């Protein structure tokens, strides 16, 4: 298909003006609904943009992007082309928010999907690098040539460095089952002798690593509908009006209508705050545990804490409830009252650290302690920090101090535990090598893999062993973490340019991303509109999708499963890899097997008609059994209790970085560090409605929804003579970015923010002109080997 024709199709029915009309309305945060757009607004927008031409068919499908949503997308097709997009219109949720069967409605990005599939920026042919790596010079080759080259390099590298030199990098652009290249390549590599595995993720690594110390399990939330019983909801580093996160927005809205109050604790006045909240508590990043300690101080002093709950279910809150073998003065009470260090953690003390006035801290503490049920909901925003493990445990401390665990309307901790999804996934063969690195340490494993062992968080090695090889071959299947989404882009690209380090990189993508540019072979793949798949929901979702093929693949693109089947044949493992099934046959198989797990699971035909199966039983109150019947249902911790003090952390003996109780830990690149003398501003990149990470970067429609600019407070701007719209230079030792400033009191003084996901676009001096936040982030991991991409300092000057 020619680019002209694509332009024609995309613009045929949905004129730019009418898209702007409603996307502009969505950008105004006061309107939020479904996945971020109000139902009425959608109907109006649909009516305005409806084609006068009758469509031939409407096909329900589902986006497989990692966007917080994953919605029901209805593609209106005429003559084999998608001419319009609509979304879930489940009649059970026709006029009002429906607690049981909420509609799974598209957000602003979803409404612009035609600009995704029919983007003029799509890669159209397999490409082979011809210039130096990273230079961006490629030649078109055939699929056969591409597969042969990958097989040849794979065999060479496997032979020379061993199977553990091959790595599938974290990549979330395709989150379906058989459609996810990341999943499928791991099956292939496992059958081909094994690979270097990875664990954890970029999203909630610290939460997942820290929560087991408190509760014995990695996920501690209830289902979202339990928020309907809450009287007070605290969104702590969470911004669902932009990040969607399942049906959070709908339940927040319903809960508010029932009278619940909603507060946000965030360095920014978020869209969620503007749309839904009653108050904003601006806080300096990384200092939240100082706020929590001061709230505990108020509660202990005013006797507002739930002593009975603490004494019955917890250890570590006071000196009378401590594990064996720990010296005196180590309990949380002792820390908060300053019994050992002589520093009582008063609201005045916390005010100096957090930037929140003491009277606001007292107000919050009293209200949180006396309103029940109260849900302290922790977003991933607080965990993506150098002290994220600590901050994660801090939120659960508040839940315990106030007895809001195991009850509907309370909230124990992070992690989407409140999901009921019973289905058959696409089977991955276990990695025969059994070794894995923390996902964030991929760049370390390129340069010093053979030195990495348990001290670097490597799992699956014998004591004293290190990795058998550095990473020599990378499969980047639907991801931009190779360069753009991983920390310290300048350091990473330098490493990747050295072809003697990682010797071969294969990328499968839709677009020529900054990561694709650093690849040796690039394969043009299919969007979700061009293939069939079974798709699980995003966190907290209570449904399963059949993501259906709507149109034939463009430009002869192949799905990952298709080209990997060709590769498997080349490697002599086709039979084991495919088990004789095509992608469509795997999809049918998954649905048949799902029916065996859940007799109510619809037939393939019904799934084709509806596109989705919504579960009927959908309420989970996490830890209800443990609280109602603690004798028969002890917590899965060593003590059987909620471990506010963790003996395991104590035994690790890292009291300055990861102590046994959730103390406030000042970080080396935080507001209390000496680095502020050189780089006084805290900076991080938040997840924005304009993009899903780096995806949609090239959509001109979405560019009109939100611009790429630096949020800076008027006080910081004035000091630097920066006016709204001025071009500014943002820099630290790791690199420099140049973009316009948005001067706004929606970000607190001392903090500046960039929308994360902008594509790294260096000029000839290496200055990024698009605002790729990872030019400024570092590669050092947090204490439990996770990604601290929100913890950074920088300086800003007028450019
Ligand atoms: N500084 C900073 N960095 C961050 C974050 C942050 O908050 N701050 N967030 C982190 C988090 S939480 C995450 S999850 C990661 C996400 O990082 P990534 O997983 O890299 O996500 P994307 O940037 O969206 O890249 C997805 C890629 O998939 C491609 N794609 C889209 N659809 C398809 C498809 O159907 N098939 C294929 N093959 N490709 C497709 C897109 O073009 C895009 O290149 O970023 C992390 N990086
Ligand atoms: N539109 C859109 N939606 C998405 C995504 C996307 O890229 N675009 N990505 C999806 C993915 S993969 C993920 S993991 C989630 C990410 O979801 P989150 O991690 O929750 O998103 P963030 O925007 O990183 O952070 C949420 C909020 O935390 C605040 N914050 C940052 N640091 C601190 C701190 O130290 N203390 C406090 N109190 N607040 C802090 C930020 O200002 C922000 O408003 O979103 C998902 N949804
Ligand atoms: S981008 Fe995500 S939230 Fe938006 S419509 Fe698509 S699936 Fe839904
Ligand atoms: Mo994420």
Image (cartoon, rainbow, N blue to C red):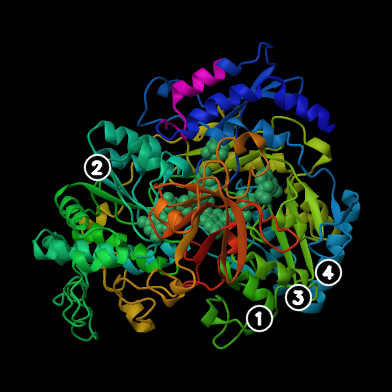
User: Where does the image place residue 173, in percent across and percent down from the top left?
Assistant: 63, 49
The quarter in which the C terminus is drawn is bottom right
Which residue is labeled 2 in the image? Answer: 230
The residues tagged by marks 4 and 3 sit, at their Cα atoms, a distance apart of 17 Å
Which residue is labeled 3 in the image? Answer: 501
Q: Judge depth for marks 4 and 1 and give the one in front.
A: 1
Q: Earlier in the sequence, mark 3 or mark 2?
A: 2
- Secondary structure under tag 1 reads helix
Q: Earlier in the sequence, mark 1 or mark 2?
A: 2
The residues tagged by marks 4 and 1 sit, at their Cα atoms, a distance apart of 23 Å
The residues tagged by marks 1 and 2 sit, at their Cα atoms, a distance apart of 49 Å
User: Where does the image place residue 656, in percent across and percent down from the top left?
Assistant: 36, 80
Q: State which quadrant residue 531 falls in.
A: top right
Q: Judge depth for marks 3 and 2 and give the one in front.
A: 3
Would residue 489 be counted in the magenta stretch? no
> Which residue occupies the extreme front position in the image?
721
Q: Which residue shows up at 89% across the image and 58% down it? A: 148
The image's mark for residue 448 is 1
644 over 549 or under it: above or below:
below
Q: Is residue 602 visible?
A: no
Q: Is residue 660 visible?
A: yes
Q: What stretch is highlighted in magenta?
A: 31-47
User: Where does the image place residue 636, in percent across and percent down from the top left?
Assistant: 32, 66
288 over 583 or under it: above or below:
below
Q: Is mark 1 within 8 Å of ligand 1?
A: no
- Secondary structure under tag 4 reads helix
């Amino acid at each position: 298909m020619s680019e002209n024709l694509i332009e024609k199709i995309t613009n045929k029915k949905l004129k730019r003006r009418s898209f702007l009309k409603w996307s502009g309305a969505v950008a105004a945060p006061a309107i939020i609904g479904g996945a971020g757009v109000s139902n009425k607004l959608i109907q109006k927008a649909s009516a305005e943009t409806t084609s006068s031409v009758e469509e031939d068919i409407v096909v329900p499908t589902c986006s497989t992007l990692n966007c917080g949503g994953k919605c029901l997308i209805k593609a209106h097709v005429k003559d084999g082309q998608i001419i319009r997009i609509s979304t879930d219109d489940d009649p059970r949720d026709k006029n009002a928010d429906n607690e049981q069967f909420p509609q799974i409605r598209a957000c602003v990005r979803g409404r612009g999907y035609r600009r995704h599939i029919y983007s003029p920026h799509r890669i159209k042919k397999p490409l082979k690098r011809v210039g130096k790596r990273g230079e961006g010079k490629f030649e078109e080759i055939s699929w056969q040539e591409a597969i042969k080259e990958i097989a040849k390099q794979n065999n060479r590298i496997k032979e020379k460095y061993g199977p553990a030199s091959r790595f599938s990098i974290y990549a979330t652009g395709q989150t379906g089952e058989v459609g996810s290249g990341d999943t499928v390549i791991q099956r292939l590599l496992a059958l081909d002798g094994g690979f270097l595995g990875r664990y954890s993720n970029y999203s909630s690594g610290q939460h997942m690593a820290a929560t087991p110390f408190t509760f014995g399990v990695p996920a501690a939330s209830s289902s979202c509908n339990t928020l309907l019983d809450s009287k007070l909801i605290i969104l702590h580093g969470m911004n669902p009006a932009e990040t969607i996160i399942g049906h959070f927005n709908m339940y927040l809205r319903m809960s508010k209508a029932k009278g619940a109050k909603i507060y946000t604790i965030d360095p920014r006045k978020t869209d969620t705050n503007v749309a839904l909240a009653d108050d904003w508590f601006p806080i300096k990043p990384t200092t939240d545990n100082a706020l929590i300690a001061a709230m505990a101080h108020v509660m202990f002093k005013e006797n507002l804490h739930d002593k009975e709950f603490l004494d019955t279910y917890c250890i570590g809150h006071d000196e009378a409830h401590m594990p064996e073998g720990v010296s005196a003065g180590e309990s949380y009470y002792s820390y908060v009252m300053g019994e050992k260090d002589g520093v009582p953690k008063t609201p005045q003390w916390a005010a100096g650290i957090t930037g929140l006035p003491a009277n606001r801290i007292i107000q919050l503490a009293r209200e949180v302690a006396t309103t029940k049920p109260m849900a302290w909901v922790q977003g991933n925003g607080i965990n993506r920090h150098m002290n994220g493990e600590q901050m994660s445990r801090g939120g659960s401390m508040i839940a315990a101090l106030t007895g809001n665990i195991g009850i509907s309307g309370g909230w124990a901790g992070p992690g989407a535990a409140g999901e009921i999804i019973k289905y058959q996934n696409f089977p991955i063969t276990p990695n025969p090598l059994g070794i894995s690195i923390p996902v964030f340490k991929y760049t370390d494993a390129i340069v010093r893999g053979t030195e990495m062992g348990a001290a670097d968080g490597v799992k699956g090695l014998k004591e004293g062993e290190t990795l058998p090889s550095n990473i020599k071959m990378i499969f980047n299947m639907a991801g931009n973490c190779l360069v753009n989404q991983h920390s310290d882009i300048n350091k990473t690209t330098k490493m990747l340019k050295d072809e003697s380090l990682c010797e071969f990189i294969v990328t499968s993508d839709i677009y020529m991303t900054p990561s694709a540019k650093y690849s040796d072979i690039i394969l043009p793949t299919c969007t979700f509109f061009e293939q069939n798949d079974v798709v699980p929901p995003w966190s907290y979702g209570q449904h399963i999708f059949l993501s259906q093929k709507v149109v034939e693949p463009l430009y002869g693109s192949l799905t990952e499963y298709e080209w990997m089947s060709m590769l498997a044949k080349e490697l002599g493992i086709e039979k084991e890899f495919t088990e004789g099934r095509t992608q469509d046959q795997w999809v049918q198989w998954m649905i048949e097997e799902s029916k065996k797990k859940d007799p109510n699971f619809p037939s393939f035909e019904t799934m084709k008609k509806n596109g989705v199966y919504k579960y009927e039983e959908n309420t989970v109150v996490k830890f209800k059994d443990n609280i109602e019947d603690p004798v028969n249902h002890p917590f899965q911790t060593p003590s059987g209790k909620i471990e506010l003090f963790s003996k395991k952390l104590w035994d690790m003996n890292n009291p300055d970085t990861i102590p046994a109780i959730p103390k406030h830990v000042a970080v080396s690149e935080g507001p209390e560090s000496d680095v502020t003398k050189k780089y006084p501003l805290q900076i991080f990149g938040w997840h924005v409605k304009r993009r899903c990470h780096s995806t949609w970067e090239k959509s001109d429609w979405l560019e009109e929804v939100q611009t790429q600019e630096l949020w800076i407070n008027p006080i910081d701007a004035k000091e630097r003579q920066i006016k709204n719209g001025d071009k500014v230079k943002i820099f630290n030792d790791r690199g420099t970015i140049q973009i316009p400033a948005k001067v706004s009191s929606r970000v607190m003084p001392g903090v500046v923010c960039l929308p994360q996901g902008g594509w790294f676009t260096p000029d000839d001096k290496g200055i990024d002109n698009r605002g790729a936040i990872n030019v400024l982030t570092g590669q050092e991991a947090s204490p439990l080997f996770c990604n601290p991409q929100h913890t950074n300092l920088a300086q800003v000057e007028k450019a």
